[in-house]
Image: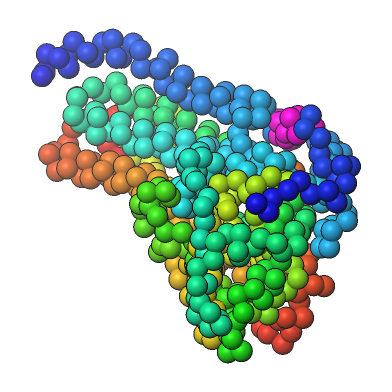
């Protein structure tokens, strides 16, 4: 197994357990006070709970703090395990992610099934603290462990004609009870352009908070592309297919006017039903401004130069 | 059947108001307690927003259930509970709007204005609320006398518009799984249908318990 306790995260970068345990005290207090209209925003900011800095990772902003592990593992969208955000933690608890096989298909030298270890084993383990921005305008800061997607792409040996990488989630309604209802066209699919997949920021996560990836967060293998909205981060990947045509993706199929193929975080392009200009960082009270490419413009913007990002949202 | 109704009437009549008061107050106390005790999950503001919105719709459905219930039982005194439930709806709507304005947007008026103008589901939610204001203002007996039963009835038909706007507001706010808002919409559809059916059966209640 690839998961190990990362040794290059400073202990000062990690919020102590005791601090986690009190972490929402401020919300209750702030909420109650604000209800009475008694406090100014600055006072609320001052009450913001210090949960330790996330450390100096690319793209992180000065006041980014790690999201408490409990929040990141109990509040997320994973419709395969229910449409409520607290459903996945409950409904995925009996899911057995191992053994796991990933089929590598399409324009590759030798299409074949890979065991989990064959696909990601022996690759350099990465510790990445990334901002995570959901299309629903909430966000977190999450420490991931995993491998660079570009290393996995290289291992799959794509042919010169390959331009896109398509990922597919497991389809097994007996193991994923949410798939019993056709809320989305199953199985969930996502895709990247090959240059996006080869961007050093793109990660195949196998762990978070120094532990194996929890079932509810996409065990055993989840895509993390921090400059894109969270729905691009497909979970429980069982198929990786290289193609020369832009693949269909699930949310884009379900509602093309609301969810694009690129789904790059962009405060200038609103979701048709809500603004994307600001976001609520989970655990903080006042919304914060959303940054272009979720703060990773320096690392990724050049891939989209010349593209009309209003059209290719 | 008729005698069962008669036997049930007086205990229900005595218990109904305290029961309704509890129904209005207890969820509010529970939500505030959950907020203070950090029991609302990772996103407590969203949790409060959703809960207060749903309670608004539930009380609205309750107030709209009274007229058909009067038709079925012949209990004219229920009309006072209709007003009570209508006002309860209004107060929950104020709570819902306050959570949005204070906790969610934190008085970011430009963002709120943009939401109301640009996001149809928020436009509809605001419309549903605004339509309730004249109804709450004219909920007193004096207002009924001043306006006269007929005009008061006409005015209070705005509640139908408010209910439709509220239902669509909920439907539109949901990302993908429409089951829950559809259930709410179905309840309102049934309540509307009951009214039409009972109305066809002929006029019933005298003034002071206006139809509508």
Q: Residue at x 76, y 46 (%)?
A: A5
Q: Is residue B129 above or below residue B64?
A: below
In the picture provided, is A14 more to the left or to the right than B42? right
Tell me, yes or no, if residue B199 can be seen here: no
Q: Give the residues in magenta.
A: A19-34
Main secondary-structure element of the magenta-colored stretch: helix
In the picture provided, is B55 more to the left or to the right than A220? left
Q: Is residue A313 above or below residue B177?
A: below
Q: Is residue A33 magenta?
A: yes
Q: Residue at x 42, y 33 (%)?
A: B59
Of residues B125 and A260, the one nearer the viewer is A260
Q: Residue at x 56, y 24 (%)?
A: B30
Of residues A237 and B70, the one nearer the viewer is A237
In the picture provided, is A230 more to the left or to the right than B8? right
Q: Indicate the position of residue A89 as horizontal and vertical percent values.
A: 54, 41
Of residues A123 and B43, the one nearer the viewer is A123
Q: Indicate the position of residue A195 as horizontal and vertical percent values.
A: 68, 80
Q: Is residue B17 above or below residue B138?
A: above
Q: Residue at x 51, y 61 (%)?
A: A101
């Amino acid at each position: 197994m690839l998961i190990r306790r990362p040794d290059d995260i400073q202990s000062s970068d990690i919020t102590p357990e005791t601090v986690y345990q009190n972490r929402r005290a401020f919300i209750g207090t702030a909420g109650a006070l604000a209800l009475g209209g008694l406090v100014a925003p600055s006072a609320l900011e001052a009450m913001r709970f210090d949960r330790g800095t996330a450390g100096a990772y690319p793209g992180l902003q000065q006041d980014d703090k790690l999201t408490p592990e409990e929040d990141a593992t109990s509040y997320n969208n994973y419709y395969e395990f229910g449409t409520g955000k607290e459903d996945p933690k409950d409904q995925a608890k009996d899911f057995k992610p191992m053994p796991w096989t990933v089929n590598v298909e399409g324009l590759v030298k030798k299409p074949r099934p890979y065991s989990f270890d064959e696909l990601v084993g022996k690759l350099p383990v990465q510790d990445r603290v990334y901002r995570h921005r959901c299309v629903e305008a909430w966000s977190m800061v999450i420490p991931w462990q995993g491998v660079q997607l570009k290393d996995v792409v290289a291992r799959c040996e794509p042919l010169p004609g390959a331009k896109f990488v398509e990922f597919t989630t497991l389809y097994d309604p007996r193991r994923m009870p949410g798939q019993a209802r056709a809320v989305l066209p199953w199985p969930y699919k996502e895709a990247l352009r090959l240059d996006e997949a080869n961007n050093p920021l793109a990660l195949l996560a196998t762990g978070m908070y120094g532990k194996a990836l929890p079932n509810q967060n996409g065990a055993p293998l989840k895509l993390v592309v921090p400059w894109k909205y969270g729905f691009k981060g497909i979970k429980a990947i069982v198929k990786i297919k290289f193609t020369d045509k832009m693949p269909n993706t699930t949310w884009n199929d379900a509602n093309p006017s609301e969810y694009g193929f690129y789904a790059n975080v962009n405060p200038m392009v609103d979701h048709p039903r809500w603004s994307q200009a600001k976001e609520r960082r989970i655990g903080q009270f006042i919304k914060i401004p959303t940054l272009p490419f979720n703060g990773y413009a320096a690392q990724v913007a050049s891939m989209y130069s010349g593209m009309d990002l209003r059209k290719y949202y | 059947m008729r005698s069962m109704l008669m036997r049930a009437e007086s205990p229900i009549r005595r218990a109904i108001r305290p029961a309704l008061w509890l129904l209005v107050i207890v969820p509010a106390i529970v939500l505030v307690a959950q907020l203070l005790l950090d029991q609302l999950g990772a996103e407590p503001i969203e949790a409060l927003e959703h809960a207060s919105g749903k309670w608004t719709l539930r009380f609205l459905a309750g107030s709209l259930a009274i007229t058909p219930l009067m038709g079925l039982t012949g209990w004219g005194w229920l009309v006072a509970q209709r007003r009570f439930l209508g006002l309860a709806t209004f107060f929950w709507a104020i709570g819902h709007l306050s959570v949005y304005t204070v906790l969610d947007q934190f008085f970011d008026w430009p963002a709120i204005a943009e939401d109301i103008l640009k996001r149809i589901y928020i436009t509809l939610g605001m419309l549903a609320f605004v339509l309730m204001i004249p109804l709450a203002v004219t909920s007193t007996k004096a207002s009924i006398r001043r306006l006269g039963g007929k005009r008061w009835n006409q005015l209070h038909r705005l509640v139908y518009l408010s209910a439709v706007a509220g239902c669509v507001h909920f439907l539109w706010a949901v990302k993908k799984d429409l089951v829950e808002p559809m259930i709410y919409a179905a309840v309102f559809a049934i309540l509307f249908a009951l009214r039409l059916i009972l109305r066809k059966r002929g006029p019933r209640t005298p003034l002071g318990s206006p139809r509508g």
